[in-house]
Every structure is written in structure tokens, then in C-alpha cells.
Image (tube, helix red, strand yellow):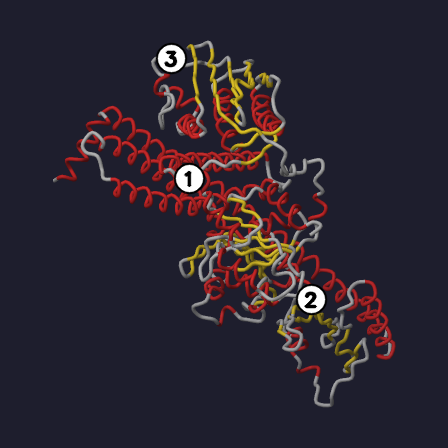
Amino acid sequence: MDKWRKIREVIKNMGAKSVIASSLVFLITVAATCAGGYHFYRTTKESICLQGKVNAVQSAKEFDGYLLVRKNTVILAGHVVDEMIRENKPNSEILEYLTAESLSIKKSIDMDYTGLYGWINGEYLDGVGWVPDDDYVPTERPWYLETMADDSEVTFVKPYLDDQTKTVLTTMAKRLSDGVSVIALDVTLSRIEVITQQIAQQTPGSYGLVLDKGGQVIAHSDDPELGKNYLEEKDTLGAALASALYGEHDQQFELRFNGEEYMVFTERIEGGWQAVSLINTRVFYRPLIILLSTLALVTLMEAAVFIAILYNQSAKNLAVASAEEAHSANRAKSRFLSRMSHEIRTPINAIIGLDSIALRDESISPHTRDELNKIGASARHLLSIINDILDMSRIESGHMELREEHFSFRDFLEQIRIIVGGQCDDKGLRFVCNPIDPLDEYYVGDSLKLKQAIINILGNSVKFTDPPGTITFTVEQAASAGDRVTLRFTMADTGVGMDADYLPRLFEAFSQEDTGNTTRYGGSGLGMAITKSIVDMMGGEIGVQSEKGRGTTFTVSVSLGRAHETVLPEAAPSETERDDGALKGMHLLIAEDQEMNAEILADLLDLEDMSCEWAENGQRAVELFAQCETGHFDAILMDMRMPVMDGLAATREIRRLHRPDAATVPIIALSANAFEEDVRQCLEVGMNAHLSKPVDIELLKEALLKYTVGR
């Protein structure tokens, strides 16, 4: 009863309108997710059908071209020998022709040709001089018997798997006009096997194969399947496929086997064979599942955090919890958000990585490129919401700490100018950056958090200002006392402005002026709350003046330390100074438990001409490094959370190995654990750097250049 009383009290404090509004937002989010999921499903299915048809048609065209050359060779040789028989040419002349033709074909067309041979005028003749054993009876061999029983112009003799070479062979043979003579040519199908594998590799989750008229596998993208007869198998994927293929079927149909769903596409080729493309639809739908799961998780997380904050605020009117209870709640919340950070960032990393790789394909249509850009923008928007929620949680729990580091104020202003100036250029706004001297070259403080606060304000100015508006950013030294300096930042825009009644609530979490702006401009409503908290932590002040329709002016004052003579950190190389060519040919070790993330990272590295090996957990990473030659790996990319052995333990083990490169090989953390304490733990165990997921390939390249080149 007490539980229900508290829930009723929360609803009462929230108000009926707020409850209804929250419910509507939730329902709209669910509807949008379902609509987007259906659209992505339909687009994905169309993509599967298109790719499957292309694979089947392309393979059939390649196979027909390969087989037709050899078929025509048999036909031409048959006509020549027929003519020689009619002219009563002796077998010695016929043998000379077969020998010369076999040599010519071998030189000009195919080194794998075994030569022309046959049963002609009651005698076995072989163009390469092979002499059979005494017990060899040509007229009892399959190539002769099947040809005599077949009325086709050229007979495709039943293929067979050579046990020694593990390649499939067949014979093309032609019955001559005398009715008893046969000319033949052995054909190796290894080239068809290569073509099948190459085409299958173009599509994830795809299998390519060729079946003869009797259900025998004569080419397959998976080598162990060669030579099998699917019509003779039971309870296998091949048996299910053969049952559908040799029954009534279209050129395109769906196949279900062992809980998996496949799309099957077929084309008939020479010899009555069938070229088949088999696509596992689950591989294509996996990004859809990840996207929908991520959307659901983020929606639930936002709802949980939103309700938790409202519930805590309401509970304060009922009773004050004890200090120990509050401390325990904060610890549990931090653990929860840390886990959620990892679990949510991991699929977002996959989405952004797959999206980036897909966008590099120049062959995709403009419509598909537009859809991929929308997926990438949505994933990055989700990531920004997660970052805001995590920042707010760290502030509330007291886990956010300020750093005292020397930083270049010129670089600080330049980074703000590049980021905000680019946003203004994209929107058609004018950005004015106005530093007023005197300003020091270097200061001491937390430049990252100060930059975050300033960009939060300027980003809102860009969002709420319509073109051709102006955004002005002014910085000046307001006061100086000993080793401390007070800087004042003024940010003014000509945007929509705010009502005076709303200004007292501007810095509250989840606060936005009205529903219309929420719909038009979006956002989580946490940016100003985070900015106010950062300024307060720095011992500064923030003020705002605004008038509806006239614009807004923010003033931020913070205290920073003066930088005296000291060793200042080296500036990062600029884009023009960076030599990406030094990365080409690097060989990396990826320690990552998620196979999809490892495949995506490998693809991104491959696009930069770098190669890699994959370890599915920390223990395997240690084993691979310990077993390789010194200098085999240029760097190690280490995930933190992995089964068997995590990234921290794996790094300790690698650094303890008794080999020259154990202490020097660069180890870079690529982790969805993005809290400051996670970064500190990585550096303490011997990692060189920490990069958070989703992986920014440019930041990764900078880190690799910094820690590998010239070491």
C-alpha cells in the first residue's frame, strides 16, 4: 500500500497534463520506431532480392562463357575429324591433328587443358600421347557410354571429384557422324569454383554453388561441399535446397531451414546445370535489429532517467533519505549507467561503422546514400543524447572532476571557431569571434570542460537562430589577482529569444521553453543544465539576457590559473602536417569480443591499407602476441570488457612478457566504457591511449601515428 501511495504522490506532483504529455511522447516514439523499422525492412528486402539476382545472373554468365569456349572446341574438332573420316584419312593423320590442336589450345587458351582424345575408327587416339593400360576399354568408359546414349550436340558427362587434386572434373564429348566414333575433352571446373567464391564474397551471408542435373555439387563457395549429392542427403541445408530446386520452383524463392531464412536465386547454364545464389537474410537484417534494439534501449533509458529524476524530486516533499541510502543509490546508478554506456555504445559503434563503410561504396544509388546518411545522423544523435545523460549523471553523483592542465588558449579559441564556424556556414549564419587583448598565450585549467560549456551555448545559438542571423563570440580578461585570472566570455545571437518568465528555469534539467520549440529544434533539454554545472564547478558565474524575437546574450565568467615557465604539451599535428602514408602496411592486433565490431573495424582499417588479426578475448590476444615474431604487430587495439580475460588484465599480461617488444608495442583502448575512471585505469595498466566507441577513424589514425611512427 505504501508503494502505491508513493506512485500516486508522484503522479500528483507531476500533474495530469505532464503524465498525458509524457505518454503521448512515448507512443509517438514507438510509432516512429515501428514506421522506421518497417521502411528499413522493406528497403533491406529489396536490396537482398537485387543482390541475389545480380549474383545468380553474373555467375551464370561467367560459367556459360567458360563452358562455351570448351564446348565450341569439341564441336570444331568433331567437325574436322568427321571430315577426315569421310575422306578416309588414316588414323595417323587424325592423331596428328588431335596432337597439334591440343598443343595449340593449351598454349593459347587454357594451360589446364588435358588434350583432345577419343574412340575413332575403332581405335583409341590421344592428343597428348597418353597410352592406356591393357585393361582400359574405351567403349566401356562413362565418357563413351553417356555420349552414345545422349542425343545432344555435345554431351556433358557426369562430373566427379578428383580425390588427389580436390577439384571437380567433367568431360565434354561429341558423337561423330559415323555413329560409333566419339571425340572428347576433359574439363577442370576449378575456374568455376573460383568464380563462385568471388561472387559469394561480394555479399555478406551469401553462398554460391553450381549443381548438375543429378543434384551433385560441382562448384561451391564452401570447399567441403564439393562432390556431395544433395539429392542423396537428409536433414541438411543442401537436402532442403535440392528438394526445392528439383521440384516445382521459380527462379527466386524463399527457403527455411533450422530456424534460418534464406532467399534463393537460380539460373540455368550449359549442360542443364544450375547456378544458385543463396543469401542468409539474417545477416542483412542484423543492422535493423541492432538499430531497433538501440532505439528501444535509449527510449527506455530516457524514460527511466526522466522518471527517476521526477520521482526523486517528488520524494523530497515526502521525506529526506539518509546519507547512506543516497550514497548507495548513486553507486548503483553509476554502475547501471556504466553498463548501459558499454551496452548501448557497442551497437551504435556497429551502426556508425557499417554506415561509414557503406557510404564509401561509390556504386550505391542516391536514394540509398540518402537513407544511409539518415541512419548515420540518427545514430550520432542517439550518441549525443547518451553523452548528455551520462554527463548529467556524473555531475549529480559527484563523479565529475576538473583537471588542472596547461593549455594553449589560441588553440582553444581556434577549435571553437572551427566547430561553431562550420555549423554557421552550413546554416547560412555569420559567426564573429572577437578576442580582446590582453590575453595570455597559455592558461591552467580544464580546457575540455570549459570548451564543452562554451560550445553548448554557441550550439544553442546556432540552433535557435535563423539565417541570415549573426552570432558573436567575445572573450576578454575581466580581472587578475596573483596566479589567478578571470576570463569573461560573451555569446550573443540574433535568434528567436526567450520569454522573461522562462529564464529562471533555463538551467533546469530537461527544461525547454515550449512544446513548439521541442518539436522544431529537438534536443534532450540537458545542455544548459550541464553547462551551468560545469561553470559552477569552476567557481564561475553564468548570466543570460533575452528578449522574445530579438535574440539572447549569455555571459560566462570563470577563473583560470596563469601558466608560468614550464614544459608545455606538444601541439597535435595539423591535418596538413599529418602523414597518413606512414600508416600504410601496418599490421594490427584487434582484441574485441563482438565479431561484428571486429569485422567493421577490420574493414575500416583495410580502407586505409592496414591489415589486422582478430582475438575474440583478452586471453587469446595475449596468446597471439606471445606466439608471433618480434615486431609482427605494429600496435594492439584493446577492448576493455571481454569474456575469459578483460582488456586491463590482458594489457598487464602482455607488458609482463619476456620479449623485446612487450614493453614498447603501443596498446590503444577502443572501449564503450567512456567514464574518466575508465580512461585512468587504462593508462595505469600500461595502455598508451584511450579512444571511446563509436570509433572515430581519424582520431584512431592520429593515435597510431603518435605512438607507432618513429618509435
Of residue 276 and residue 560, the one placed in the foreground of this image is: 560
Other residues around mark 3 within 10 Å, as few (<14) / some (14–19) / many (≥20): few
Figure quadrant of residue 355: top right
Disc 1 on helix, strand or loop? Answer: helix
**Residue 60 in picture, x, y percent from top left:** 63, 55
**Residue 29 in picture, x, y percent from top left:** 36, 33
**Kind of residue at disc 2:** Val
**Kind of residue at disc 1:** Tyr
Residue at horizontal 36%, vertical 19%?
A: 514
State whether residue 60 appears in this view. no
**Residue 94 in picture, x, y percent from top left:** 84, 75
Q: CA distance from mark 2 to mark 1?
A: 51 Å
Disc 2 on helix, strand or loop? Answer: loop
Name the N-terminal-most of marks 2 and 1.
Answer: 1
Name the N-terminal-most of marks 2 and 3.
Answer: 2
Of residue 580 and residue 298, the one placed in the foreground of this image is: 580
Give the residue pinned by disc 1.
38
Q: CA distance from mark 1 to mark 3?
A: 41 Å
Dot label at residue 154: 2
In the displayed structure, does residue 659 sit left or right of residue 685? right
In the displayed structure, does residue 393 sit left or right of residue 562? left
State whether residue 680 appears in this view. yes
Give the residue pinned by disc 3.
499
- Point out the residue furthest to the bottom here: 134
Other residues around mark 2 within 10 Å, as few (<14) / some (14–19) / many (≥20): many
Answer whether labels 1 and 3 touch (C-beta < 8 Å): no
In the displayed structure, does residue 515 sit left or right of residue 644? left
**Residue 83 in picture, x, y percent from top left:** 82, 69
- Point out the residue furthest to the left here: 1
Figure quadrant of residue 161: bottom right
